[in-house]
Amino acid sequence: MNTSYQTLLLEIDDAGICVLTINRPDKLNALNDQVFKDLDKAVSSIEEDDEVKGLIITGSGDKAFVAGADIKEFSEFKKDQATKLSQRGHRVFQKIEDLGKPVIAAVNGYALGGGCELALACHLRIASATAIMGLPEVSLGLIPGYGATQRLPKLVGEAKALELVMTGRFAKADEAAQIGLVNKVAEEDVLQESKAMLKSILKQAPIAIKNAILAIRESGSSSGYETEANLFGDLFNTADFKEGTTAFLEKRKPDFSGK
Ligand code: DAK
């Protein structure tokens, strides 16, 4: 896997956990064109790399996860360019959401605007006690353009999503957990706790995890139940299903092969 990027740091440990760090600490890891190009490539290579079992996305430094899209860069955009770049952002974030491996955002500080949207595209979010999240786009004369109008209501409900987007106010970590914007607040080190949660997921059957991601992604859509039935049925053909049920009956721990 290509592990060298201008704006990202990638590290893979022995358990197959890849930590992807957005690395522009002097700009609080704001998302510019280069970050999107790097993210696009990195997520593709993570997808193809069988050694990588799960992904954690975090931000460099102790202040920010990502403090938004790069305001300096987008301040000169015109309509067509903005629409096109919004679509590119959707595609890259969708790639993260569609990754058949679990993805956790370790929200280690400010996650604002596009940064909050990046966290929303991950499957799970764990916040540090100092995390501050929000969608202040209306204060810049905009609305969220990287998916939050669609993903946020699924997590916090339509009324809370409208409140956060229309006021642009920030939520501290405790409130974010209380409204379902993050799964939990880390008691100590957000990266270590994200790794611990990922490790507990990676003990389970990999194809079942992938199918769970695909099925839950379709919740609320008209094809959701049909998708669930198909993905559920497919698992009966896997070696992991045989191993999981056999291990239970033999009163031992399963040893999943991911097949
Ligand atoms: N963009 C560019 N630079 C940023 C930045 C950002 N979003 N956030 C911080 N920085 C830079 C600051 O300019 C400063 O750079 P220098 O002046 O040192 O060169 C450096 O990071 C450190 O920031 P501060 O000095 O401001 O640090 P403080 O601790 O005082 O304040 C803060 C932290 C997070 C409260 C503050 O930095 C802040 O308010 N940042 C902006 C937050 C924000 O409004 N984010 C943007 C949300 S709107 C689009 C699609 C999506 C979007 C846009 C376009 N298209 C498809 C076109 C999404 C928009 C958003 O994300």
Image (cartoon, rainbow, N blue to C red):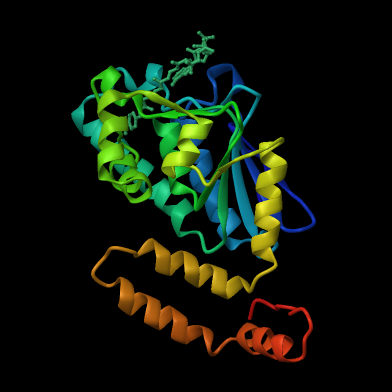
Residue located at (23% from left, 20% from top): 141
Count the numbered circles shown: 0
Left or right: 191, with 166 as reference point: right
Looking at the rendering, which quadrant does residue 60 occupy? top right
In this view of the protein, which residue sits in the foreground, 60 or 132?
132
Q: Position of residue 106 (x, y in %)?
A: 60, 40
Q: Position of residue 3 (x, y in %)?
A: 67, 45
Residue located at (29% from left, 18% from top): 139
Left or right: 189, with 80 as reference point: right
From the viewer's perspective, is residue 58 above or below residue 257?
above
Residue located at (45% from left, 86% from top): 233
Can residue 7 be seen here? The reply is yes
Which corner quadrant of the figure contains ligand 1?
top left
Q: The C terminus is located in which quarter?
A: bottom right
In this view of the protein, which residue sits in the foreground, 51 or 117?
117
Can residue 112 be seen here? The reply is no
Residue located at (33% from left, 41% from top): 148
Q: Position of residue 176 (x, y in %)?
A: 46, 36
From the viewer's perspective, is residue 122 above or below residue 148?
below
From the viewer's perspective, is residue 222 above or below residue 190?
below
In this view of the protein, which residue sits in the foreground, 81 or 205?
205
Looking at the rendering, which quadrant does residue 163 occupy? top left
Q: Position of residue 165 (x, y in %)?
A: 29, 31
